[in-house]
Amino acid sequence: DTGVSQDPRHKITKRGQNVTFRCDPISEHNRLYWYRQTLGQGPEFLTYFQNEAQLEKSRLLSDRFSAERPKGSFSTLEIQRTEQGDSAMYLCASSPGGAGPVYQPQHFGDGTRLSIL
Amino acid sequence: AQSVTQLDSHVSVSEGTPVLLRCNYSSSYSPSLFWYVQHPNKGLQLLLKYTSAATLVKGINGFEAEFKKSETSFHLTKPSAHMSDAAEYFCVVSLNFGNEKLTFGTGTRLTIIP
């Protein structure tokens, strides 16, 4: 179990630029989640995938945000035309998936910290 | 909809004394509740979970939490604090046994005084 891997760990960019983050889940985990955490706050849900299907998107995920998981393995989160308010830690989590009643824990990566200049 | 309220943004205790981090929840359905810990610049680690089994749940590193439906609370406790417990703690609620999106509280920063 190599854990959830996120790349890069840190990204500094100028306002208006596009950025893309990558998340590699634990192998054989069907579900993949993206969360955003701003300074002093708890993480907020953005979106999640069951295999390659994007099942739910938060209202926080504006039109400038897009997430993909093309082959049901790794996922990318792209932010277009970045704004100051996009500065945050972006966290990825994965889980085996399932509809209950057995709990399937979400395993988190260390996150990508985005700073907008 | 579901939500959690962490009643203290910052808690300080002396090493070796008990820890109490308070959390109240709101949920339209039977919730699943969790406590996660986050050390600086790291991801989140699951401490313990409640998914409708025993109301007193034990987690890692000596932490416990008790689900009290009548009080809509899920407070986190530890009998004796250790320096390594200093971190940010999040109370979390979810549906479907936790197999859906997690809704986090705003966090409680725990400081341990030597």
Image: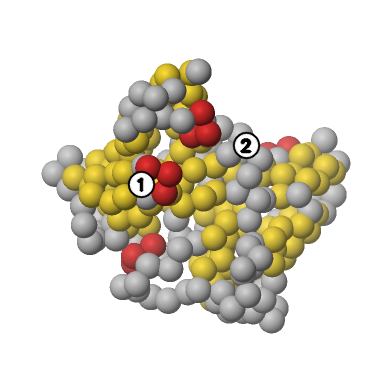
What is the C-alpha distance between the residues marked 2 and 1? Answer: 24 Å
> Do the residues marked 2 and 1 share a common chain?
yes
Is B89 left, or right, of B50 in this rendering? right
Which quarter of the picture shows residue B15? top left
Could you tell whether A56 is left or right of A3 in the image? left
Please indicate, yes or no, whether residue A69 appears anywhere in the rendered image.
yes
In front: A40, or A7? Answer: A7
In the foreground, B92 or A56: B92
* Residue drawn at 64 percent across, 79 percent down: A72
- Colour style of the rendered protein structure: secondary structure
Where is mark 2, residue-wise?
B40
Please give the label number shown on residue B3: 1
Q: Give the secondary structure at mark 2.
A: loop
**Above/below status of B97 relative to A82:** below
Give the residue drawn at x 33%, y 27%. B18
The relative height of residue A43 versus residue A61 in the rendered view (above or below) is above
Residue A58 in picture, x, y percent from top left = 52, 58
Q: Is A79 left, or right, of A91 in this rendering?
A: right
Please identify the residue farthest to the left as the structure is shown: B70
Q: Is residue A104 left or right of residue B18?
A: right
* Res A105 quadrant in image: bottom left
Is residue A68 at least partly visible in the picture? no
Residue under the image location 36 percent in, 46 percent down: B3
> In the rendered structure, which amino acid carries the disc numbered 2?
Pro
Q: Chain of mark 1?
A: B
Residue B86 drawn at (x, y percent): 51, 31
* Local crowd size for mark 2, using a 10 Å CA cut-off: few (<14), some (14–19), many (≥20): few
Circle 2 or circle 1, nearest the eye: 2
